[in-house]
Amino acid sequence: MLRIKRLYTFIIQTFIPVFMMTFAICLFIVLMQFIWRYVEDFVGKGLDNTVLAELFLYAALNLIPMALPLSLLLASLMAFGSLGERLELLAIKASGVSLLKTMRPLVILVACISIGAFFFQDEAMPRIQVKFRSLMISIKQKSPELDIPEGSFYSGINNFSLYVKKKDPKTKMLKDLMIYDTSEGFDNMSVFVCDSAIMRVTEDKKYLLLNLYSGQRFANFRQADLTSNASHNSQFVPYSRENFVEKEIVISFDSGFDRMDEANLEGTQISKNIAKLSHSIDSLNNKMDSLNIQDRKLLGKHTYLTYRNNDSYQKNKEDQVVRSKGEAPNKVNFDSLMSSFTLEETSQYMSVAASDAESSSYNMMEVIPKINMQKNIRLHQIEWHRKFVLSFACLIFFFIGAPLGAIIRKGGLGMPVVVSVILFIIYYIIDNVGYKLARDGVWVVWQGMWLSSMVLFPLGVFLTYKAMNDSALFNTEAYGNFFRRILGLKKKAIYDNEMIIDESAIPALETLNADPSIISSLESMSVDALKDVAKNHQQYGYGGDTLDVVLSVLKTKGASFFDVRIKSLDYNESMGYYYAFLKNYKIAIIGYFAVLTLWLLQMIIESDILTFTAFIATLGYIGCYIKSFICYFDFYRSIDKRIKKNNSRIMILSFFCIWGLYKYLKKQMRSELENIKW
């Protein structure tokens, strides 16, 4: 009997609930995106709830290929991020199980999901797309629901404009109705004005019936003589006026919902599986080959010199053949013929010949049918490759998400969602670019359709390799030191400049010559508060004598010192960062004014040399600016103090007016130096 290891069961039980949740969320999000995109096509048309439910069902099934890779990426990232955050992944590695072996059950599971996605694309998706496209086209073609507003003209009925002053919701009576009928042309427009009316739809929903009460009808006369006279005299146009007590009008208005026949889409590429697509591609290629053979025969039979096909030329040629029987035919020396013309005549004759050749080839060859057939072939090939791309994308996203989750060690819906959305947006953009390049024939179809997979596959291999070797991919110190080397700054030490407390070396409280009030205040504090004072005594302004009293009080209270690390601040190091900041900041101020001057001169003179110089100077200013604020951050790290939020805003503001903040930053850093000097 096949038994699954307990570790594999644990990994699968961790992954499956997260995957089901993320798949539901991703499918809901893409479905909402579909609704927002096509909301104008089905809102306000009086569709039944069953029709809308059917549309949303087919839309959800049609959007599964988009939601599945994203949900696998998010689920694998969240699952392994949670394992790393809870240190479970560390325990698994400590027991001798590698990351790849830990991923083995999920690799098998994702492979099964990919195979299922392939069969879904091959068998179910053609039927779903046919039903979805036919239903969507039917909804778009349906007339909007009749809803005449009060106090404004309604033009939702073709060739009619209606104005209703007031509507009675109980009796459904329309008050003070005005109708403009332009069904017979604007010149022969009819106008109906009545006190009230009732509107209803016929049983077949093909016509509107309007019963008008107590009104008048105005229309132009249609007599030929009056019309001709009216055309000569535009100041007066005769019209007829009809008074009525009750009148019925029939207006053609199809308000029914007619489903499109699904057979109209059966021959398209969306309705075919791989076998049918392969057969159609072979058939279309054979037709294309036959058209090419036919064109080659046609070009071989006819010539680009169209005058040779004229009857007069053929008759003259036959006469020459009859006269020259038994004699050698006269040969024309083309070079001597061309040399007899002037340069202008030669250019004119060659342009006319090229134009005639192009028009002849276009007329003889079936260009438009061949272009349409080539596009049809590409669409079939795109659909054929699409069925494989989805399955491979599922595997790629798993091998991106799982190692990335093991590296960043963050679970939940915070960081994993951000990373997943960014990666999926990159994938979606690349996939759309490849699809359009393949559809338009710019690239070969397989290159365009597999472009996204070819771009993301190396990323999956790289992340898997890094996660298996426990590489510090997101080590900010390593990247910071890299940029410091580029900018020529001092490399930041990666060790911690902390002092470990030796409990035996702490003097007794009685031996210290300390103020009794200070001792009593310290004894009233809790152990945690005293440890905080010991760790950050320099930040609180206490000297070494006070630190000895704090440690002695902790010792008398029986506190442990294994978690007490006292930061040893180096005043000289902080001074070095301070002077480095001032030096680079002054250079950045000079660069700021130089850049401003160069760009102003470029706007006045508009010289390419000035533009290039201003661009180089801008890059230099940005480098000095970044270099100065790296020293600024290093200064605050050296004094063991966090950067305030307003300092980040000051950094952004100083990029545009760096000269205005020099004194403020210098004074701020100088005061911090005075606090740590003792």
Image: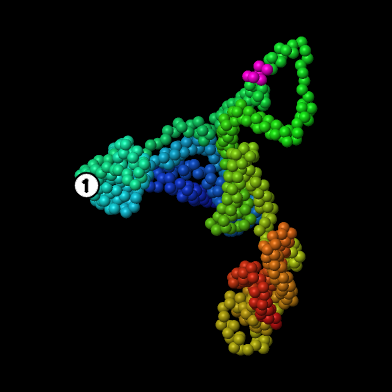
Q: Is residue 250 left or right of residue 447?
A: left
Which residue shows up at 56% across the image and 53% down it? 421
Residue 312 sits inside the magenta stretch: yes
Which residue shows up at 68% across the image and 79% down it? 670
In the image, which residues are magenta?
A: 311-316
Residue 668: which quarter of the image?
Answer: bottom right
Q: Secondary structure at mark 1?
A: strand
Q: Is residue 558 left or right of residue 168?
A: right
Which residue is more in the foreground, 254 or 191?
191
Q: What residue type is disc 1 on?
A: Ser
Magenta segment, principal secondary structure? helix
Is residue 17 visible in the rendered structure shown here? no
Which residue shows up at 71% across the image and 59% down it? 607
The crowd level at tag 1 (other Cα within 10 Å; few <14, some 14-19, many 20+) is: some
Is residue 248 visible in the rendered structure shown here? yes
Q: Is residue 543 above or below residue 356?
A: below
Residue 228: which quarter of the image?
Answer: top left
Identify the residue position indicated by label 1 in the image: 214
Which residue shows up at 64% across the image and 39% down it? 443
Q: Is residue 173 left or right of residue 339?
A: left
Quadrant where the C terminus sits is: bottom right
Q: Give the percent coordinates (x, y) of residue 465.
A: 68, 50
Q: Is residue 79 above or below residue 189?
A: below
Q: Give the percent coordinates (x, y) of residue 275.
A: 56, 30
Residue 55 sits inside the magenta stretch: no
Quadrant where the N terminus sits is: top right
Q: Give the percent coordinates (x, y) of residue 458.
A: 67, 47
